[in-house]
Image (tube, grey):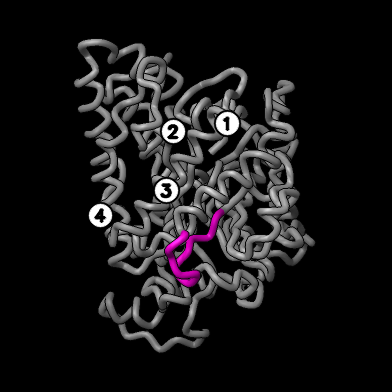
Amino acid sequence: MMWHSIVSAIALAHAVNAWLPRDRDLAAFNQTLRFEKLGKRFEPSLPNGVTKIRGVNFGGWLICEPWMMANEWSKMGCASSDASEFDCMRNRYSGANRDAGNQAFQEHWSTWINADTVQSVHDVGLNTIRIPIGYWSYTDIVDTASEPFADGDLMLPYLDAVVQKATDLGMYVIIDLHGAPGGQQQDAFTGQNPNPAGFFNDYDFGRAEKWLTWMTNRIHSNPAYASVGMIEVLNEPVSQHDGGNRYPAPGEVPGLVQTYYPGALKAVRDAEANVADSKKLHVQFMSSKWDSGDPRASAAVAGDAMTGFDDHNYIGFALSETGDQTSLMQSACTDSRVVSGEDFLVTGEWSMTSGADWSDAAFFKKFFTAQQQLYEKPGMAGWVYWTWKTELNDPRWTYSYATSLNYVPTDAAGLENNVYQDVCTGYT
């Protein structure tokens, strides 16, 4: 998540081989079954099958972002001056203190998100989780002499438990390479704080490809990962909408699109050489709307029928008057995120962040609904909100808090009914 910068069933059918949630009859996409499990009588007046992805990110979990978790960051022994996980481990837990750093991060991994969290996400009607993770989770590719992250293999039991719970509940899971070697953005969401972004070179492309191979093998060999259906090769690389003359980062053009993207796709597909097409993963790339290049400019990506695309849209960052409610609603009600050729397109990050007073319940109910409808228009596969949990006490960023305030629907039927609410009259 870059906090400082800015389908229809027919469309879903275009990705003809890799599996989609409906192909495995995932329980979280079956409204009738969900309500029966909750002990409620439910006679659906809407279509039984929910084909749209409706989910949340587990931000701040396997990659900490101090801006949204200041108390947790301090509890872990990290200082406010430590911009990232890399900095905290280097500055607070070097040398003989390393074991204490590993223990601090393990405590965080076990408590910030866990199986109970997945149950809570399911119980408010959501069917999908996106898990941001860093390359250091695969310790074989970490240069321990210069990259002092906590030991990534220690996070894996916590990851396994979360995806196992999602599988048990029939929830769709997206694994997102959020922090790449060298850092693909000048931001702590990469787990580092590079200046400039240092990912765009053959050495780090190669390390990321090894991570994708490793994670793909893990997904296909571990039954806990049975409902992981998509792997994202890179989150939010430096883009043309970044300020400070960041774009392009050294080596980014044409390296990202012409070298890394096809190499990343090949890494996944080679690992799936003996996997049936019906069980292969969708391989996800940032949408061309992200303005870091068109992934389909690579012939390999354009020619693969099992690709997915990730749109990120923070309306409150894009407007000059971030508190103007009319402008916010007009953007949500008139925009289109559809991109021709990007057939399995998910808005994988969005929020209600804005300058509008978060206590205005009537406005935020409308703003959420308008955005839900935007990301579920024909040509869109659905959405994943940023994020489930923060320490900001702010429903604009925190889906769990928004549900407690009833700013957003709190069950699957409510989310389905939301599609039919008229909130855009007067804003189009």
Residue at the spot of label 4: 116
Work out whether mark 1 precedes mark 2 in sequence or the reverse, and give the earlier one: 2
Magenta stretch contains residue 58: no
> At which x and y percent is residue 296?
72, 52
Q: Nearer the viewer, mark 3 or mark 2?
A: 3
Residue that mark 2 sits on: 68
- Does 294 sit left or right of 159 as displayed? right
At label 3, the amino acid type is Ile
Query: Do residues under tags 4 and 3 come within 8 Å of each other at their CB atoms?
Result: no
Nearer-N-terminus badge (3/2): 2
Q: Characterize the local packing of mark 4: few (<14), some (14-19) or many (20 or more) Cα atoms within 10 angstroms.
A: few
Residue at image point 27% right, 34% down: 108
What segment carries the magenta color? 273-283
The foreground one among 424 and 34 is 34
Residue 230 visible: yes
Q: Earlier in the sequence, mark 4 or mark 3?
A: 4
Q: Which mark is residue 319?
A: none
Whether 278 is among the magenta residues is yes
- SS class, disc 4: helix
Where 401 sits versus 8, above or below? above
Question: Can I make out residue 119 in this image?
Answer: no
Coordinates of residue 210 in the picture (x, y in percent): 45, 40
- Residue that badge 1 annotates: 184
Mark with earlier residue (1, 3): 3
Task: Tell me the kind of residue under disc 4.
Answer: Asp
N-term mark: 4 or 2: 2
Q: Residue at x 40, y 35 (%)?
A: 63
User: Which class describes the residues within 10 Å of circle 2: few (<14), some (14-19), or many (20+)?
Assistant: many
| Residue pointed to by mark 3 | 131
> Which SS class for mark 1?
loop
Q: In this picture, is 215 found above or below 424?
A: above
Q: Is residue 97 above or below residue 406?
A: above
